Amino acid sequence: MPQQSSTRRAVIYTGGSLGPWSLALAQPGDYLIGADKGAYYLIQNGIAPHLALGDFDSVDAAALERIRAEAKETAEYDAVDKDWSDTELALREALARGYRDIVIAGGLGTRFDHSLANVQLLAVANEAGAAALLVDAHNEIRLLTAGSRLQADQRYTYVSLLPLTSEVTGVTLTGFAYPLQDATLRQGMSLGVSNLLSAEEGFISLRSGSLLVIRSRD
């Protein structure tokens, strides 16, 4: 019987850029999903994913056999027959199993098309009532459709705000070096790029639209 949860967190390891930073994301009690070679990355590092899924076209036969043997559950998909990327399959499976707090590691990398598609998956999670976070070695990306607070984090110097919808209205920032008051951010504008927190806590409010909040470091 697939594990169901509405409270615990799911962490998805995908086939993009992974490293020691990604292993540090996992916390006791997390439900770990390995998508394609993300599953093999976990197994190579002595971690058996609760679920390994994908078409596994990024691993060789020996690696796939090891995934089948060591993952607690495996779901294999035909590379031609499936409509979604392995990362989207993993996200939708996490949502179907009741997870509403989801971290995606390895969703950013050298393939910009996959990276951009994975950023847009944050909207899929949001529409399902879930909070999803896309993380790599230098960035942490979330999607807001309502107000939020940000705690100062020494890992990330910059905070950038970019609209995912054509425009985001009523953007107000407090606790930032460059505050905004009832601003409208439209796609193509760089007004929200490279802000800084000026206090231990910053507040973001908005009236309408979907806003990407990107915390990053050089």
Image: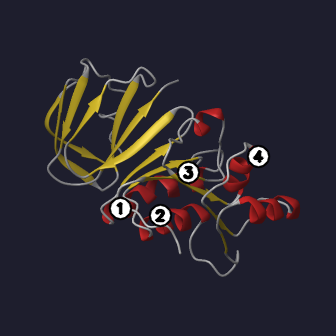
Report how far apart the C-alphas of labels 4 and 1 lie in the structure.
29 Å
Q: Residues within 10 Å of mark 4 (few under 14, many from 20)?
A: few
Q: Which residue is mark 4?
A: 44
Q: Earlier in the sequence, mark 4 or mark 1?
A: 1
Report how far apart the C-alphas of labels 2 and 4 lie in the structure.
23 Å
Q: Which residue is mark 2?
A: 94
Camera-side residue of 28 and 76: 28
Disc 2 versus disc 1: nearer the observer: 1
Q: Earlier in the sequence, mark 3 or mark 1?
A: 1
Q: Earlier in the sequence, mark 2 or mark 4?
A: 4
Report how far apart the C-alphas of labels 3 and 4 lie in the structure.
24 Å
Q: Which residue is mark 3?
A: 115
Report how far apart the C-alphas of labels 2 and 3 lie in the structure.
19 Å
> Which amino acid type is shown beneath numbered disc 1?
Ser
> Which amino acid type is shown beneath numbered disc 2?
Ala
Q: Which mark is residue 6?
A: 1
204 relative to 197, above or below: below
Camera-side residue of 109 and 166: 109
Q: Earlier in the sequence, mark 2 or mark 3?
A: 2
